[in-house]
Amino acid sequence: MKHFYFRPGKYSGLLFLPVLLIASCFGQQRPPAVPLIVHDPYFSIWSMGDRLTDGPTRHWTGAEQPLAGIVRIDGKPYRYMGDAPREVPAMEQASLAVTATHTLYEFSAAGVRLQVAFFTPAFPQQLDVLSRPVTYLTWTVASTDGKNHQVDLLLDVDPRIAVDSDNQAVTWGRSKAGGLTVLSVGSRDQQVLNRSGDNLRIDWGYFHLAVPDGEAGTTAAETGIVRSFPDSGTLPSSDSMELPQTPRDGAAHLAVSFHLQCAANHPEKRHVLLAYTQQYAIEYLERKLKPYWQRNGESVSSMLSQAEADYESLEARGVQYDKDLTEDLTRVGGPDYAQLAVLAYRQTFAAHGLVAGVDGSPMLFAKENFSNGDIATVDVLYPSAPFFLLFNPALLEGQIRPVLEYAALPRWKFPFAPHDLGRYPLANGQEYGGGERTEENQMPIEESGNLLILGAALGQAQGDWHVAREFWPQFTKWAEYVRARGLDPENQLCTDDFAGHLAHNANLSIKAIEGLGAYALMAQALGHADVARDYMAAAKEMAAKWETMDQESDHYRLAFDRNGSWSQKYNLVWDRLLGLHLFNPRVLDTELAFYQRHLNAYGVPLDSRADYTKLDWELWTASLASTPEQFEAFLRPIAKWINETPSRVPLTDWYDTKTGKQIGFQARSVVGGVYIKALSDEAFAKKWRGLAAQKP
């Protein structure tokens, strides 16, 4: 089987979706997990094997949410998705292509070629489209032996897709939405926003399988379909009425089948819509907020109808979008970089909930997946920020504004910035560390520096400093705190809190210094010239002191007082991106040369304490390279890791550089940080950020 990614080139499957024309072979590359339906932390389904038939499809947490696919060719059944029923043989998977908005599989058996395409129009410049919880699933069937074939296609959706666990009762039904037949399933109890946490699936709202009338599909909501279809090729003539039931006890599956006459040289194509809707998605400061697509009261029916009406135009745009993005990523960082960035694309979005604020403005809440489930974690927004600064800065504003509003309330009494707003999906106040009660286990320098840097980066990207102006008292308070305590940080946590508390943290000190420079940029933009001069001078003075405090022989230490130690100084990336130039260039040159001498099989360790690394920080470090050759030297081990890691999960950002195994974390938004290299390319940033200002 060949695994394709996205380099432009010729592809033999010319009968199928033209997006494959942009896919070209990267040897035997393969993603650790393959995105299928990825929208938000609750509607996120993946294939976690080499082949789509190797196992059941799963929620990003690993819980089974099976989508089963069976095809009958001239009466003989084969599986194309899922591992059940096992007695039905799997089709041969010929190829896999992953692009920014598409995942495409190609299968073959008995003289027939079947392409299965998942398309999510995740265009950050079109928020109305981006916020629609719809993925299109398209099948294209063609004869490869010059003969005519009768082909029966089945898609079967397990009701576990709508609940946290299989012992929760569900109800189901069918309805019409314009030219669509819609089968729906959801929990019986519908306890909206009833709890928060990490390893959870949604148990309110409804999953929808929407079939266009013009596709001539047959639908059913019944049990045992994947068992009966291989023999009969048909669906039950009626729906189950045994309501409600739990998935464990035989709740009805949702199914659609298509009966096709596949003639030689005449491919047949069918598609459906897979969607998940919920009345409310986030609770922010005790207010329940609707998904962004519902901000004007649009109904589920009209949303699905419009999504179907837009199918062909969105598909055409997606093909071009994937091609253009892949070409530009390859130009900026080479094929290894393009592979990584494209794989991170949909995952970055899928770790967020996009909702409408009280005034209808977009608010984007990140979930700290497989960490502790926190919502709007500042040191998660910070590493993912390059993605949003690049594609649509309004989405970064939609992330930091809720934090800034919270920090401006009297209830936040500390002189430093918050860490989070609670646990997803309840953003009602910080819960990490001491919460609102004590300074215990807080991240004072970390989060204050993060928001100062993001405030300046947002202003530069938008060409408008309204956020800095509106929250100037908060930024000023944090700048004063960082100036007083940031050069030589006390014993405290930083974003790499899994490594524990650390005093005199050299990389954290860099963040403080860059944060002061960022504050000076905001002050200058807002007309506070004296403040800007004062803080920029202080930042330069601190940078000079930092170098003498931390230098040791051929590198710089992990902590000022730890001889023989070292760490990646990834926070230096903002010195260049913000145009601050606070640090002597020899710091970068010295560090990068040192890191190259410490490359392991799968990357550079985070620091001298362990062999593990962080994927986002590796890319920030690599983006500081002075030549393309040096950048590629850092990328090659990472590309090898993607292909060889034994941990088959949505991209982890915390792994062992010697074994390639996941240490922790998966499916997190921080992988958006890999776009730091693209963000640092002026032409790339201008082009893609400019799309957000254009009418779709």
Image (cartoon, rainbow, N blue to C red):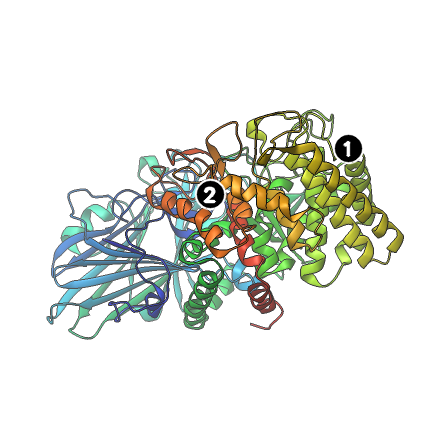
Extreme right residue here?
Answer: 530
Q: Is residue 333 above or below residue 638?
A: below
Extreme bottom residue here?
Answer: 265
Count of numbered marks: 2
Using a 10 Å C-alpha cutoff, classify the residue at mark 2 as few (fewer than 14 neighbours), some (14 to 19) or many (20 or more): many
Give how far across and how far down residue 625 sits, in percent: 54, 51
Name the residue tied to disc 2.
667
The span from disc 2 to disc 1 (Cα, nearest Å) is 34 Å
Q: Is residue 492 left or right of residue 373?
A: right
Give how far across and how far down residue 662 sits, in percent: 41, 35
Q: Is residue 472 left or right of residue 262?
A: right
Q: Is residue 648 left or right of residue 129?
A: left
Q: Is residue 371 above or below residue 668?
A: above
Three-letter amino acid code at disc 1?
Arg
Residue 269 in view, yes or no:
yes
Q: Quadrant of residue 555?
A: top right
Residue 202 in view, yes or no:
no
Q: Quadrant of residue 448?
A: top right
Q: Earlier in the sequence, mark 2 or mark 1?
A: 1
Circle 2 SS class: loop
Name the residue tied to disc 1.
485
Point out the image quarter for the C terminus: bottom right
Residue 162 is marked as none
Q: Is residue 314 left or right of residue 196?
A: left
Residue at image point 79% right, 51% down: 520
Nearer to me, 29 or 385: 29
Q: Quadrant of residue 564?
A: top right
Nearer to me, 16 or 511: 511
Residue at image point 55% right, 29% down: 498
Q: Nearer the viewer, mark 2 or mark 1?
A: 1
Using a 10 Å C-alpha cutoff, classify the residue at mark 1 as few (fewer than 14 neighbours), some (14 to 19) or many (20 or more): some
Nearer to me, 270 or 521: 521
